[in-house]
Image (cartoon, helix red, strand yellow):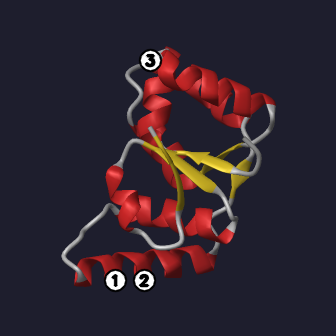
């Protein structure tokens, strides 16, 4: 697969559990330099580590993956995404709205297990 891919926290968790359904795809696209990290995913992953050993492993992994910065306009777009979804009775975490905004600005696809991303216009998804 070509182009930028932001792997959402839900898929990284499966990857770190060595779930082969996701590991092959991620490994292949890491090799192709298609996988990118962004701030909300990093924060969610670090928040979920269980001990110092896991923290070190995660830190080394994160540092090896290219990073897409969250710009001012991404924060504004995240607010707009959340506002528009809430008007239609759909509430999503602001972190996911921010991931969506970063993906839109960078023309990146999002690989996720979270179905609520489907409700966000202009987001290209890789759903598993």
- The image position of residue 111, as x and y in percent, is 53, 45
Q: Are marks 2 and 1 in contact (CB under 8 Å)?
A: yes
> In the picture provided, is 12 more to the left or to the right than 24?
left
Badge 2 density bin: few <14, some 14–19, many ≥20, Cα 10 Å: some
- The image position of residue 39, as x and y in percent, is 56, 53
Q: Are marks 3 and 1 in contact (CB under 8 Å)?
A: no
Which sits earlier in the primary sequence, circle 3 or circle 1? Answer: 3
Q: Residue at x 25, y 68 (%)?
A: 91
Element assignment for label 2: helix
Badge 1 density bin: few <14, some 14–19, many ≥20, Cα 10 Å: some
Mark 2–mark 1 distance (CA, rounded to whole Å): 6 Å
- Which residue corresponds to mark 3? 17
- Which residue corresponds to mark 2? 80
- Which residue corresponds to mark 1? 84
Vertical position of residue 102 compared to residue 59: above or below: below
Which quadrant of the rendered structure holds the C terminus?
top left
- The image position of residue 117, as x and y in percent, is 40, 59
Mark 2–mark 3 distance (CA, rounded to whole Å): 34 Å
Q: Which mark is residue 23?
A: none
Q: Residue at x 60, y 65 (%)?
A: 102
Residue 56 at least partly seen: no
Which sits earlier in the primary sequence, circle 2 or circle 3? Answer: 3
Element assignment for label 3: loop
Which quadrant of the rendered structure holds the N terminus?
top right
Vertical position of residue 79 compared to residue 42: above or below: below
Element assignment for label 1: helix
């Amino acid at each position: 697969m070509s182009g930028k891919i932001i792997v959402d926290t839900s898929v990284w968790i499966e990857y770190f559990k060595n779930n082969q359904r996701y590991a092959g795809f991620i490994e292949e696209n890491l090799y192709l330099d298609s996988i990118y990290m962004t701030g909300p995913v990093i924060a969610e992953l670090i928040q979920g580590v269980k001990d110092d050993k896991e923290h070190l492993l995660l830190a080394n992994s994160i540092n090896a993956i290219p990073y897409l910065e969250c710009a001012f306009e991404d924060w504004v777009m995240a607010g707009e995404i959340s506002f528009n979804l809430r008007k239609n009775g759909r509430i999503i975490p602001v972190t996911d709205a921010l991931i969506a905004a970063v993906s839109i600005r960078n023309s990146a696809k999002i690989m996720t297990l979270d179905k609520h991303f489907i409700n966000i216009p202009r987001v290209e998804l890789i759903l598993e």
